[in-house]
Structure formats: C-alpha cells, structure tokens
Image (cartoon, rainbow, N blue to C red):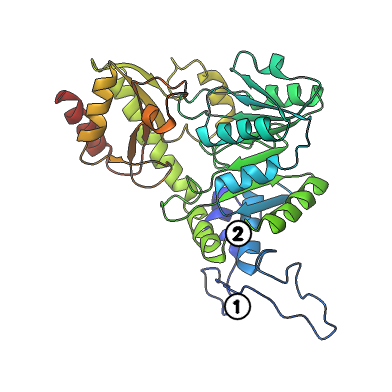
Amino acid sequence: MKRHPATRAAQALHHLNAEGGVSPAIDLSSTFARDADYQPRQPYIYGRDGGPTIKTLEAVLADLDTAHHALAFSSGMAAITTLMETLRPGDGLAVPRVMYHGTLAWARHLAETRGIELTLYTPDTLESALTERTRLLWVETPANPTWDITCIATAAKAAHRSGARLAVDCTAAPPCTTQSLALGADIAFHSATKYMGGHSDLTAGTLSLNDDALAEELTHLRTLKGNIIAPWDAWLLTRGLRTLFLRWERASENAQAIAEHFSTHPKVTRVLYPGLPTHPGHASARTQMQNGYGGMLSLIMDSEATAAHVVRNTKIWIPATSLGGVESLIEHRKPIEGPESEVAPELLRLSTGIESIKDLISDLDAAMSAV
C-alpha cells in the first residue's frame, strides 16, 4: 500500500528500534568494530563517516525529497560550504542579490580568495546572469527576507542550457510543500535548523540529490572537513521531521491570517508574503508550494523608528534570530545584516509559530499602537 509522505514522515519510515520501540534508536558511537575478516560492517568505520542514527535520518530525508541521496551536515553553512567546495578556480557562481546573508558572504569570500566568478542577479535578471563559466546557479525561494519567489522549473531550464547545476535553498519551503528536485533542481538544500527540526534545539544542514558521482564527492568532502551532523542532533532532527507536516500547516495558517490582518494596518506600508494574491510571486508560489506558504513574512513599517519600537515591545513574539520553530520570532533585519545589506531598514521579519493566532495578532497590534 502506497503511503502518503506525511505518514512516512510521522513514522520515520517505520523505523523501529532493535527491541521494537517506535522511536528510532540513538547510537552515539564514534568508532565501529570490524568483522571477523577485518572488514567494515557498514559503509562507516568512524564518526566522521556516519553512523546508524545518521543513516536513519538520511533515509527519511531522501524519502521526503524523493532523492536518491541525502547528506546531513552539522549546520546549514556546513552544507553550503561543502557544496561550493566542488567549484574550481575560474568556475562561475550565480546567486541572488537579496538572500540569506551568510550564503552571500561565503559566495563573496570565494570570489575574493578562490578566483570564482560571482554574478549577482535579481528575479528579473536570473537568465542573463548566467555566463559560459557558470557551473552553479543558486536559487533561494522564497528568498530571505523579502520572500521573493523564483520559478524552479524555469531556473532549472536556464541553468541546464548554460551547463550549470541548479541548487535550490528550500529552507522556507521544505519538502512538505515543495518538491524542488521534481521541478528540475539538481540539489535541494535545507537549513534543517529551521522548519525541518522545528524546535530551536539543533543546528543542521542537508543536501538532497540524484547525481551519484556528486553525492560521492560530497560525502568524501564531508568526511575530510569533519562537518557531518552529530548523532544526537541527527536523532533530534528525525524527531522533528515526524511533525513537519502538522507544524507547517499550522504556521502557514497563522502567517496567512497575520498577512491579511496587517495588510490594511496604518503603521504597515507593505506586507511581504507569497500567500497574498498581491505578492508579485503569488502565481509561481501557488504552483510550486502545494501545501501552504509557510510561516515566514515581512512587514515594511512606516519608518525605521517604528520597526525598532515594535521589535522591542512585543510580549509574545520573541526578538531572536532564526526561523521555523514552534515559537514565533520577530527581528529587525537590517541591523542584523549590516550596512551593506539591501534589506529595507523599515523591514521586520516574522517567523510565525504555532501559538494561538489571536494572541499573535493582539501582541503585534499592541506593540504598534504604542508607537
């Protein structure tokens, strides 16, 4: 009987532990004994290679992304830097002008130190940004923190015409809503610290892909760099994936209600949320986000002073970095990203959690009314 992805995720692919327990086991071993012929019993012999708990996690991840391979790393940046390590001096890398600032900083570092040709593009200039040297096109959709939408299928065609691979940062659109590989992407990246973990208690990054040779190269690099996920975090991430579908649906419902409520608020000049029909990427989002638009949205306030006031005066929304957890977070983004960032100084980034929507709206209303 074919099971729905939500069922497979909730049961962690029906992985029972050795005693029949319904929670997958945790194996914290850092090294593994060889068999009687002095051969490895598994593909791993040491913690940097992997282990049983990580193997279980990667099986669930691959299933969710409908991928042949999934690799788990100690953080999102660990996964990103390992993937970009496959670029050679002289290769081209195309990334969005507005995106997660950590990825952009690393891309600039590669351009400065490794001779990588870096091209920055906007949603309207993606195709023209690709050159004969481009080997990796990086797409972030929805893009942090403006939540711009890129059509993955269109980006894939453009990348492949140029002889480049397409990697999609799906952090704000995990596989419970977007199947990026099925839409043509070569690599699906997730900062699993966020929605996939969902409880603000781990850091992790993942890469899902179908290319056997690339998967082998990335596995080798991960071993050399020593940035594999730890077994305890792997177990926590597997646990988080079991409730991903439910958490995503509740966060999406809450964010949609907040976006609609504040679209007409006098202190808010614009709401950035792909679930609104007024969002320029709404049509594409509706096509490739099949199970809600997520909990991420941004409010453009009427002034930088208003944004600074609101973020300091919420009682329920927690002023903290990160996103995708069960608790709602609010952040005045420009001071976080720094003066070089193109993010508007009036922008508040909201990560909507699973709390009562009445409480969340009332808290923001109260903070705004006090300005």
| Image location of residue 131, percent across then percent down | 77, 19
Can residue 61 be seen?
yes
User: Is residue 62 rendered to the left or right of residue 339?
Assistant: right
Q: Which mark is residue 300?
A: none
Q: What amino acid is at disc 2?
A: Leu
Q: Helix, strand or loop at disc 2? A: helix
User: Is residue 256 rendered to the left or right of residue 20?
Assistant: left
Q: Residues within 10 Å of mark 2 (few under 14, many from 20)?
A: many
Q: Nearer the viewer, residue 305 or 197?
A: 305
Q: Are marks 1 and 2 in contact (CB under 8 Å)?
A: no
| Image location of residue 318, percent across then percent down | 29, 42
Give above or below for 241 relative to 55: above
Residue that badge 2 annotates: 57
Residue that badge 1 annotates: 18
Q: Nearer the viewer, residue 25 or 169?
A: 169
Q: What amino acid is at disc 1?
A: Ala
Q: Helix, strand or loop at disc 1? A: loop
Residue appearing at x 59%, y 58% in the figure:
229
| Image location of residue 121, percent across then percent down | 62, 19
**Looking at the rendering, in which quadrant would you find the C terminus?**
top left
Give above or below for 63 relative to 189: below
- The part of the image, by quadrant, that contains residue 41 is bottom right
Q: Earlier in the sequence, mark 1 or mark 2?
A: 1
**Looking at the rendering, in which quadrant would you find the N terminus?**
bottom right
Q: Nearer the viewer, residue 180 or 14?
A: 180
Give above or below for 185 relative to 11: above
Q: Residues within 10 Å of mark 1 (few under 14, many from 20)?
A: few
Residue appearing at x 48%, y 51% in the figure:
197
Give the alpha-carbon distance from disc 1 to disc 2, as whole Å.
16 Å
| Image location of residue 263, percent across then percent down | 32, 18
Observer-side mark, 1 or 2, equals: 2
In this view, the residue farthest toward the right is 37
